[in-house]
Structure formats: structure tokens, C-alpha cells
Image (cartoon, grey):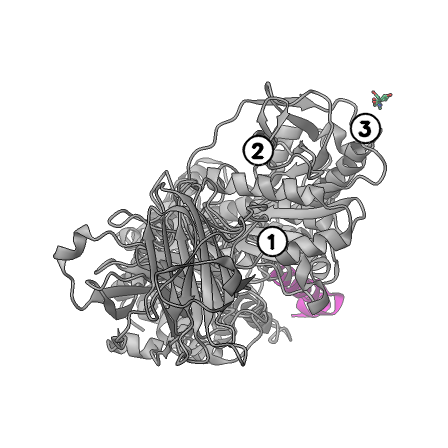
Amino acid sequence: MLPSTMTSIFTASLGLFSLTLIYICYHAANDVRLTVSPQGCRMSWMSPSYLLQHEFNSSWTPLAHRYSLWLYREVGWDPNQVMGVPVLFIPGNAGSSHQVRSIASSATRQYFSSPFVISSDFTGRGIQSLDFFAVEFNEDLSAFHGPTIESQIEYSAAAVRYILSHYPPNTRIIVMGHSMGGVVGTALLPSDDISALITMSTPHTLPPARFDARVDEIYQRNAGTLVNDSTPVVSICGGATDMMIPSESCILPDPGPEHDIYRRTVFTSALEGAWTGVGHREMVWCHQVRWRVARAALELGEAHSDIDIGGIMDTWLSRDGRLFPPVAGIDIPEVATYEALPEGMNLVMRKPTGSRTYLLPIPRALETNATFVLLVSRGSISPIAPQHSTKLQTAPFFCVGRATSPTTQQSTESVSCVPLEPSTLKLLPSPIPGKPFPVPDEGSDESEGVVLFEATVPRIPSGVDEAWIGVHVDAAGEDGSVFGGFDETRTFQSDIGVFDIVAGGAKLSLQPTERSLVRRHITFPKLLSNALVVYTLTPESVRPTTSCAHSLSLLPPLLVHKSHLAETHYHRLEHKTSATLHTHASAPYIPLSRFSPSYSSELWIYAVSTGCEDINEFTLTIDWWATIGRIATRYPTTLISWAVGVVALLMFHAWRESGKGSMPNVSQSLIAFICHLLPKLLAASFVVALLPLSPDYYLGTRGEPYLAFLAPVLLVVATGLVCVSWWLILLLMWPLRFLTRLLPPKSRRYDELSMPRSTVVSLIFICLLVFVVVPWQIAFMGCWLIHLHTCASSAHRKPYPGSVPSLRSTPIESLPLRERLDGREDDTKGTGPKEIKSSEEPDIQDACRVRNLATVTDTLNATQTYHENTHLLLLITWLLPLSMPVLAVWVRTLMTAGYTAPFNGDHNVFKVAPFLVLVEFASRRKRALSLHQNGGSYLHWGYLIVACVSFLLGSREAYRVFDVASIYIGCALVVIFSPVRFARRIAT
Ligand SMILES: *[C@@H]1O[C@H](CO)[C@@H](O)[C@H](O)[C@H]1NC(C)=O
């Protein structure tokens, strides 16, 4: 046995290590949203008013007393009566109905160009305005509590019925949900009344708080709906900026292939025109996002049948970030004049004027995978354009015919053209060189963006001499530019893996090409692609020349990082400006999906190089700070349940020791655990992390070898936290001890196993109270308080509980003797128990001299009891965080909905009854529970079961830890109180 000061130093340093690590993680996590995917959002403005729907009263739903329904109206723009397509907005956890205002206002101000004048974008298309209704849930904490979500579902379903009763028959409603509101919205499906569901920052596949089994039930129901139902669902995700939910849970689960067209996940970093990470609350007001969500809702409202909507989802809700159809109807006038360019020359124009078609001869010697690339900045490639484009319009064609000599104008007869089918047609951001991208608090401007058009060059039909790609340009000399040319797709495959990066050898050199390519493609098939790992890519140009600064490039070099169908990130590509590469494709506790490879990412580089700067080299490193931050936000639940696991192992150890003779105190258990068990457990935890378990278990990493190191780290931190919690408990008991000393000692009967009638009555009363009024979590909190008091009051009979260094200085022998002299001689049973340690053998002998044998036995027993009680206190303390969230919900609900609000479903007496009995028993008995004695030697194995459940299941289903602990305690009590054992005890 180590000397006691050594042990204290040992636990203290472990505890401090854990606290330091948690402090570091907290800061790293806070920085993630600033560094990994910064936000560039403009504030949105509106003139809101809200009309309470009085008629939606208790004759529609009993919940009308608790919640309310509001109709949003833009002051001066919307008439007071409803007239268009209804939309129901459902706020999330602690959200408000007023959050509807940004999107609702935007929808009105897009639909009407000025009050009551419909915008030209919508006239003649049969699109109606939107009527936004919003439910008010009094900022309920729905994320933590299944029954609260159920109430919200019930109320929302009634609201949908009520709203539709004001519209012509067969009208369908669009449901929009923010955060947990999206979960409520999904639970309304399948429904014939709902035409589409748009969710924002909604955790679809993983509950953010996993302390309630009933939340998981709702999630399971929703998972089935999301796979099998054909109602269109669009999920908009904020990405790494969103600190409230892990954004990988925002990705919709894979539906069957037949429903694939009805599901779209769009990350705001890919969303055309937004290109920014968006925080959780910002999602509802970020101007760049609300404009597009409102527009998508307007367009979705137009659809009348499943076929319409299926078509919409399939075409304009594209996976690369388009939320609504491009502005249609840009007519390219009849080709008037042609201009043929010499072979090998690219079409480069700045501020073009006039209307003309440029012909680029298709080289005969072109590779088979050659691509024609057209880039237009500030203008349109029909029909894609930035939101506010200039008059610059272009359209690519495939032309055959004869053009006799280059640069001469041809007449129309000799050349015939057909539109060229694009393989890619989308809007790319054009970051301003030298400025951060996206610009903080501002983001992208409406006129920003470069339209990218790519098409495979068609085969030249046989018998045709000359074939051309024609680019029609129609412009008025405004700001804007055009680039067109032939390009090869060269894919550079990099073998860089995580190991190379850690070993320091992750340089990537691209072959300099003789002709400058517009696009370069780099794949990393061996690079781990996981939400927990963040990389930094630092580009280095081989020839960084400053003399080129004046030559304004057409398209500033752009780095595109794709890791998932829905997830694309754009970065400014500049010399020594590093880009942060991260993904949400695969992540802990997220079910596997077809589209989420654990390895591989791809990069695209777009640059119309001016020839003076060429970025050819990259260094790939791990961004440790961001990686720590990402890990920190994903494992708090795991940490809590692993700490319960550590405590359960401590208990297992303590009870086994007590079977061998004496029960160790908590610090002895801790030190024994740290010195003997922990090293083995660290190795075991690492090995288990390598097993290909389902993502629901353990670390959720499916045995990913690079992430297996997390398990030992988490285990050490959890152990350190248990040490810290023990100091805190001692600190709490300190004042309590003096308080209880002031109270007169209660004369209690220390009957072993019988219970006084009054106790039985009060237990029954408490159970009844839990059954009818208060949630069981309150009773559990009470258990903790009572037990804390029990431990504190029995501690004052002891000199010191014996673990905190500061308390160590208390004299060991003198105190109990003094107490004895303080006129308490009659209470022999209460005299100072001592720590029974082998090192203190002489003290015991001393004690023997002054007391009779019975007193020593009592002393021993009291010590045992005290040690046992403090162990139990530690367990109950660590079970608190698993049950407290619901308590917070209850208090909140009482405060907002009134004291009469029904609070369903938390009256399960059986969850708390074992603790009630145990704590009551502990407060009266004199002897240790002695699970080992008299045939109960197998009982302590139950703690091992609790530990296993905590480690394996606890992180995904934390509520199971409480359940299994409660069941175990219940079973142990039944065994102890069983008549057979009882009889045997009497006999001994
Ligand atoms: C609910 O409102 C309707 C219409 O105003 C009214 O007829 C009905 O009596 C109300 N029901 C209750 C229970 O207040």
C-alpha cells in the first residue's frame, strides 16, 4: 500500500489532468465555429405582426391551454385574411414562434415586388403567396423529454387540421421545422395534408440529448418514416458552425432507391448564393439562407401533385446546393453573327458588348474525356445566374458547318447549331482575393458568383469537316467576364493517409502542365474522412510573383472540397492561405449510409490562370486544435456514462474487498482502481475500440483504428472526473458535518432489517406522490440529498473521511477520544470508528485497550457502513446527470405552462423505488449491507453488469445506464430482504 500522501497526490494530479483537458476541449470546441467553417450572414429585416388564432381552442385540442397558434403578417404587405398556400412553422428546443418572421417576411417580399403587386418572377406561373402560421411552445425544452415532444406533435397535428379548415378542400400544407421542430414535423408524417417538409438544423438521425428512452422511440418511428414515406423532405444543415447539434445527424438517412428523389440534404456551405457555415439559431435569420428557403417554399407551394413534387425534387433541389429552380426564360435570340476563333485559343472576354456567337473549333486531336468548360462571372449561362446578374447572357451550342477563315464573320446559312447538354451547370462562389471567405457578418453578395458550365465534347459526326462549340454572348458592356475553352480532366490520385500526415510526410505536388488547365481533380482514397478529424491544406505556389498583381484574373482560384453528395465546401485558394478540410460524411453514432465513405475525399481546383501564378504544391496536416474541438462536442454523454462505469467498477472492487475482510474507503478504492485495474482497462478499452462494432455501441467509430486512441483518453478523463467528484462530495459534506453535529443525536433503533411502520408509511406516501404528481427525478434528487446527509452525519463520528490532503492534517487519534469525553459516554455505539488500515494496526490495538470487544465490533461496523455509504453516494451522484435534464424540463414547464399543466410519463415509481428503499435503509442501519455475507457473494457482480452497460451502451443510450443501475439495486435489495436470507441472518 502506498503512503497516504502519495495516493492523494496521485488522485489529485489525475483529477487536475482531467479538468485541464476538459478546459482545453471547451476552448477548442468554441473555436471550431470560427475556424472550421466560419459564418458569413447578413442580418435580416422585416416588419412583423402576429395574429393569435383564438378559435383554435380546447374544442380542437386539450393542449390549447398550454400552447398557442399564431399567423404571421408582414405589416403593410399582407392582408389580414389568409389567401395563399399555408405553411406551418414549428420552433425547436427553447425556440419561439417569432422565429418564423425572417423567412415569412422574405416570402412576402419576394412574392410581392411592392405591397399587393405580384413580382414578375411569379405572375402567370400560378404560384400563390404563402400564409405562415407558427406554433408557440412557450420555449419548452423538447430535446430532453419525449412526452414534451409527443405533446408538441399532438398540438401540431391539430394545428394542421385547424389551418386547413380555413382553406378550400384538398389544400395541402408545407411544414417547416427548426431544430427539434423538424423532428416534430417528421412525426406528423405520413399525412395526406402535408405536401412537403423543410427542416433546418434538425438532428434527424441522432438525438442530441440521449437521456430519455422516449425520445429514442420517437426517433425510431421517424427513422421508419424517413425511409418509407414519399412525402418530400428537404433538410438544410448549417455544418460545423452549428454547435448545438452534430451536423452529421442533420443528413437525412438513405431512403429506399424508389424514394430517393423525395429526400434532399443541403449543407449551407454548398447552398448556391450562401456558401457559408450557419450556426444553429442563425439558421432562421441568416439572410442568405432565409431568402432561399422562402423561395423554395414558394416554388414547392406551386406543386399540386406527387408527380410535380417528385419532378421538382429531382430537378431543382439538386444535391450540389440548389434549393429552387434557376430564373427561367432567358431567351437567346436567333444567332446573328458568328466569329470563329483560331484552333487552340480560348475565349476570354472582359466587359463584353454586343450580341455575337463565338465559334471554337473542336480540335481533332482531343482526348476522349475532353470537356468544354464555360465560366461566366456576374452574368448568366441560361438559365443559371447569380441572384442579381448583369445583362450578360451566354449560351453554349454544338455547331457543325463551314467557316472558311478564322476571325471573319460568317453568314448564318453555313453553320447550324444545337444547344449543348451540360454535365454540370452551377453557380460557384468567387471569393474576393485577400479577403476572408465568407466575409464575416456580410457573406456573399447577391451579384456574386461565377456560373460554371461543363459538357463532354460531343463526338464529331462522320462526314463533317468542321465542328465547333459555339458560345453565344449577349451583353451590354457591363461588369462581367466570359471564359470558354477545352479542358482535360486529369485526376491526380494521392496516397496520403493519416499515418503519413502524423509521420510528417504529407506533401502533395501536382505535375505542372504544359497547358494551363481550368480544373484539376485530386482524390484521396486512403485519407480518413470522419467528422472527428480536421485537416489543414496549405497551398504553396511555385512562382509567387508580385508583378502579376495587376493582371486581374477572371476567376480567383477556388478550392472545392467534396466529401459527401450533399456536402461541398469552397475555399479561397491563395499562396500560404490554408484551407480547413472537414466533413460530416461518417461520424460516431451515425448509421452507415450509401453515400458516406469512411475513406476518400476529393478536391477540385478551379482556376483560370493568368500564367504568372500557379499553385502546384500543397502540405496536408492535421489541425489538432480543431480536431480536439470536434471530438469534444461529440463525447460529453460518453464521458458521463463512462464515469458511471468507473464508479461501478470501484463499487465492484470495494465489495469484493469487503468480502475478503474490510471495506476500503473511497480513496483507497480509487487508488486501487488507478494502480491496478486502470492500466489493464486502458489496454482493454483500446482493443475494444478496434472491434468492428455497430455504430450504436461504445465509441461509435465502428473499429476505426485511427480513432481507437480515444477510448483510453476518455477512460482516463472519466476516472479523473470521478476523483474530482469525490473531492466535491467531501467539500459538500464538510459544512453538513458541522450542521449535523449541532443537532441533537437522534435515538434510533438499529434494527437490522425490519422497518419501522412510520418509515413504511412515509415510503408509500412518497411513492404515491411520485405516482400522481411529481416526476420520479425529484424523488431521486431527494434520495441524493438524504444520502448526502446520512454520509455527512455519520462522518462526524469519524475523525475524517480520509482522502483530501487538506483534511489529512486533522489529528487522527485525539478527536474521537475528545468526543468521548464530551459527555457522550452513554452513547457507546456512536463513538469514533477508525479507519481500519493495516498501517494503523497499533491504533486498533490501542482502541482495544480502552474499549470492550463489542465496541470494537461496532466501530468496525460503523466504519464499514460509512465506507459503504460513501461508495453508494458516489454512484448516486454520478447517476444524477442522467436524470436531471428532465427535472429542468419539468421546472421549465411548470413555470411557463402553469402549475396545472399535465406532465406525462415521469411517474414510474419503480425507477426510483430501489434508491428510496436503499437510502432509507442506509440512514438507519448500523451495519454494512454486506452483500458478500451469507450466500450473497455473487451480488457484487451486478456492478460489473452496470459497468459493462455504461461502457458499451451508455454513450448512445445513456438512459439505459440509469435503468440497469436501478434494476440491479432493486434486485440486490430483494435478495437481502428475502425471507430466506432474513431468517438466516436472525439465526446467525
Ligand atoms: C372554441 O371556439 C369556437 C369558435 O369561436 C366556439 O364556438 C367554441 O365554443 C369554443 N370552444 C371552447 C371550448 O371555448
Q: Residue at x 35, y 57 (%)?
A: 571
Q: Quadrant of the N terminus?
A: bottom left
Q: Could you classify mark 2 by the number of other residues whose Cα lies within 10 Å: few (under 14), some (14-19), or many (20 or more)? A: many
**Mark 3 is on which residue type?**
Ser
Q: Nearer the viewer, residue 197 or 62?
A: 197
Q: Earlier in the sequence, mark 2 or mark 1?
A: 2
**Mark 1 is on which residue type?**
Trp
Main SS type for the magenta part? helix
Q: Residue at x 69, y 53 (%)?
A: 232
Q: Is mark 3 within 8 Å of ligand 1?
A: yes
* Ligand 1 positioned in quadrant: top right
Q: CA distance from mark 3 to mark 2?
A: 36 Å
Query: Quick check: marks 2 and 1 in contact, CB under 8 Å?
Result: no
Q: Earlier in the sequence, mark 3 or mark 2?
A: 3
Q: Which residue is mark 3?
A: 58
Q: Is residue 981 magenta?
A: yes
Q: Nearer the viewer, residue 397 or 134?
A: 397
Q: Nearer the viewer, residue 542 or 353?
A: 353
Q: Is residue 740 magenta?
A: no
Q: CA distance from mark 2 to mark 1?
A: 18 Å
Dot 3 lies on which element? loop
Dot 1 lies on which element? loop
Q: Which residue is mark 2?
A: 110
Q: Can residue 754 be seen from the camera position used here?
A: no
The stretch in magenta equals 964-988
**Mark 2 is on which residue type?**
Gln
Q: Residue furthest top?
A: 76
Q: Which residue is mark 1?
A: 316
Dot 2 lies on which element? helix
